[in-house]
């Protein structure tokens, strides 16, 4: 739930009303201008030009550091940009160019044309591959054509049915989402449109929608629905809560869980801390947690994340966490956990929010296929060691961004996981629905509040999980349960930048939203354990931290209204 400021702003930019370009203000000496690109944040722009966020807000008279929009013109008071704006003269013989559209990234454009991103950057004098602007003309080095450009359509033979149904891609849409909308397979819609990379579709692109029999007729098919009841899994009726019990007063933490009358806890296991060198596992950090939970009859979910440096690739971006070079190292670690805690740790979540760049090794490294390989080896090792333990797929986070460079949309990424064979390697699907400042029943078309920000895209709404369920059903996985391995609402009077929505939620609303979320999910029949984010992170990170707003216990240990409401919740 933390460190999402870049992606939150990208979503806001994508779903806000179009902003007419303002005339460039008169500039003082030393000032320049910057045109906001889709996906940028005010913080990243300030960092790029080496100015303070506060000064950038003041000069541009911006009331909200979170809300900027693509195409907006900002005055930069001082400093120099890290990227030279001028593009080089095209080399002799190179005639291919590409005009950047809103929402595109250099990584996606490079994939589209089958060229290396860094070669593309070098050909255009781009020092920072993260920064391109709509309307910018790029020189495409090398030969060939875009990899996902479909060949000209052949006219249908006489008497053949016409492919008359079309769909124009809107901002934020994904191919898997469009396929679900029309009730066709991802493979079929890709084939009909000559799309070789389902991650790359663009706003304004016109897609042909095939029918169920492949004829291309414009018959809208019904939405897929689960056809099988979920298989009962251990503890599926019990609510849970995310705790921070390592290096804490473990007994006090577990007593607080018991006070909720909850049956499950989730503890994140940071591999890089627990196994600082190969085979050197610090059991003293985990044993007290497992023992205290077992003494109270609590079920435990370990979420195993963050490869240690010794296991990371040599070229890793060590400013962010990521997966190991060899999935077998991860399998060894989770296998050791399963062996030591057999019968006392009931479930293992394999990674966390792997559709975000800072959870999967850096920008441009996202890969559902690589994740599924990690999932496969972990699943097989856990099942070989403790067959009764459940394997939960890493909870995907709603991002609203789908450039494949910084993030993949969670619905789209789940489709990629299934395409890579993930269905065979998890018992339960993990999900991270979140409500921001929206009540659980709200949707992009229904706003019951008087707030206007964090609206319009499904990523801002608790019911996002229903779309993930559609993907499961589409791939024949409707018999499995879904667990919310994190979900919640933040309430904070003075939230940090990027979490302004927390100020819109009172503590009483936080409590009501959580109760209603449980009520709604139980009516679905396929949602199993729901882990409230979080119990006690306020006391660990401090009351000013963004995680404190989600906590149901204050930094001083006293319960918030949400804790009291959940403790009294009917089971």
Image: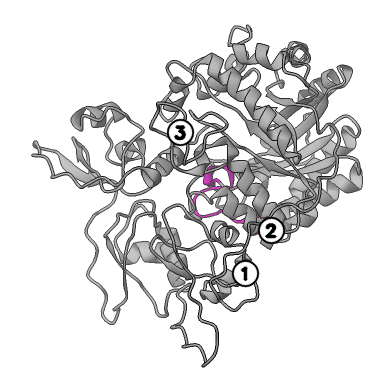
- Please name the residue shown 43% across and 83% down the image: 152
Q: Which residue is mark 2?
A: 474
| Magenta-drawn stretch, dominant element (helix, strand or loop) | loop
Dot 1 crowding, Cα within 10 Å, few <14, some 14–19, many 20+: some
**Mark carried by residue 319:** none
Observer-nearest of 505 and 380: 505
The disc label shown at residue 187, or none: 1
Please say whether residue 294 is visible from this viewpoint: yes
The stretch of residues the image draws in magenta is 356-370
Q: Position of residue 212 (x, y in %)?
A: 64, 71
Taking the spot 44% from the left edge, 41% from the top edge, the residue there is: 456
Residue 447: give its label: 3
Q: Is residue 191 magenta?
A: no
CA distance separating discs 1 and 2: 12 Å
Label 3, secondary structure: give it: loop
Count the labels in the image: 3
The part of the image, by quadrant, that contains residue 349 is top right
Residue in view at x 63 percent, y 44 percent: 466
Q: Is residue 274 visible?
A: no
Q: Look at the numbered disc 1 and give the secondary structure of its residue.
A: helix
Drawn side of residue 53 relative to residue 269, left or right: left
Q: Is residue 320 above or below residue 301?
A: below
């Amino acid at each position: 739930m933390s460190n999402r400021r870049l992606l939150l702003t990208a979503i806001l930019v994508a779903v806000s009303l179009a902003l007419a370009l303002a005339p460039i203000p008169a500039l003082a000496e030393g000032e320049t201008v910057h045109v906001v690109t889709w996906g940028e944040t005010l913080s990243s722009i300030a960092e790029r030009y080496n100015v303070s966020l506060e000064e950038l807000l003041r000069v541009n008279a911006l009331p909200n550091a979170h809300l900027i929009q693509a195409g907006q013109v900002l005055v930069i008071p001082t400093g120099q940009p890290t990227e030279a704006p001028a593009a080089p003269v095209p080399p002799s013989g190179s005639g291919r160019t590409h005009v950047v559209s809103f929402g595109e990234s250099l990584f996606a454009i490079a994939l589209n044309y089958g060229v290396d991103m860094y070669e593309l950057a070098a050909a255009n004098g781009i020092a920072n591959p993260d920064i391109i602007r709509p309307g910018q003309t790029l020189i495409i080095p090398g030969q060939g054509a875009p990899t996902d450009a479909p060949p000209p359509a052949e006219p249908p033979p006489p008497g053949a049915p016409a492919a008359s149904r079309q769909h124009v891609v809107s901002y934020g849409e994904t191919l898997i989402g469009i396929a679900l909308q029309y009730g066709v397979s991802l493979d079929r819609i890709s084939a009909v449109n000559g799309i070789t990379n389902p991650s790359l579709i663009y706003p304004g692109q016109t897609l042909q929608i095939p029918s169920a029999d492949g004829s291309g007729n414009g018959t809208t098919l019904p939405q897929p629905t689960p056809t099988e009841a979920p298989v009962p899994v251990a503890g599926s009726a019990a609510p849970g809560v995310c705790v921070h019990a390592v290096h804490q007063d473990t007994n006090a933490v577990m007593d607080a869980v018991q006070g909720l009358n909850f049956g499950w806890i989730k503890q994140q296991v940071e591999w890089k801390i627990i196994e600082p060198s190969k085979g050197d596992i610090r059991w003293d950090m985990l044993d007290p947690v497992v023992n205290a939970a077992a003494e109270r009859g609590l079920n435990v979910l370990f979420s195993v994340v963050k490869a240690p440096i010794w296991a990371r690739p040599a070229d890793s971006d060590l400013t962010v966490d990521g997966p190991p070079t060899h999935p077998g190292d991860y399998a060894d670690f989770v296998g050791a956990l399963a062996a030591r805690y057999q019968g006392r740790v009931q479930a293992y979540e394999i990674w966390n929010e792997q559709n975000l760049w800072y959870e999967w090794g850096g920008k441009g490294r996202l890969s559902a296929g690589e994740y599924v390989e990690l999932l496969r080896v972990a699943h097989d090792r856990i099942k070989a060691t403790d067959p009764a333990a459940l394997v939960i797929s890493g909870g995907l986070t709603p991002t609203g961004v789908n450039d494949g460079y910084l993030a993949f949309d969670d619905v789209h990424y789940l489709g990629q996981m299934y395409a890579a064979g993930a269905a065979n390697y998890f018992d339960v699907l993990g999900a991270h629905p979140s409500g921001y400042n929206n009540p659980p029943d709200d949707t992009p078309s229904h706003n019951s509040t008087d707030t206007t920000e964090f609206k319009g895209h499904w990523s801002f709404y608790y019911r996002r999980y229903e779309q993930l369920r559609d993907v499961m059903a589409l791939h024949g996985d409707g018999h499995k349960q879904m667990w919310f391995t994190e979900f919640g609402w933040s309430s904070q009077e003075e939230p940090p930048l990027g979490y302004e929505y927390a100020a819109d939620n009172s503590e009483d609303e936080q409590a009501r939203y959580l109760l209603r979320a449980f009520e709604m999910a139980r009516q679905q029949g396929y949602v199993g354990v729901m882990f409230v984010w979080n119990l006690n992170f306020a006391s660990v990170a401090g009351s000013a931290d963004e995680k404190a707003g989600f906590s149901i216990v204050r930094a001083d240990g006293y319960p918030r209204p949400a804790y009291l409401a959940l403790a009294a919740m009917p089971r």
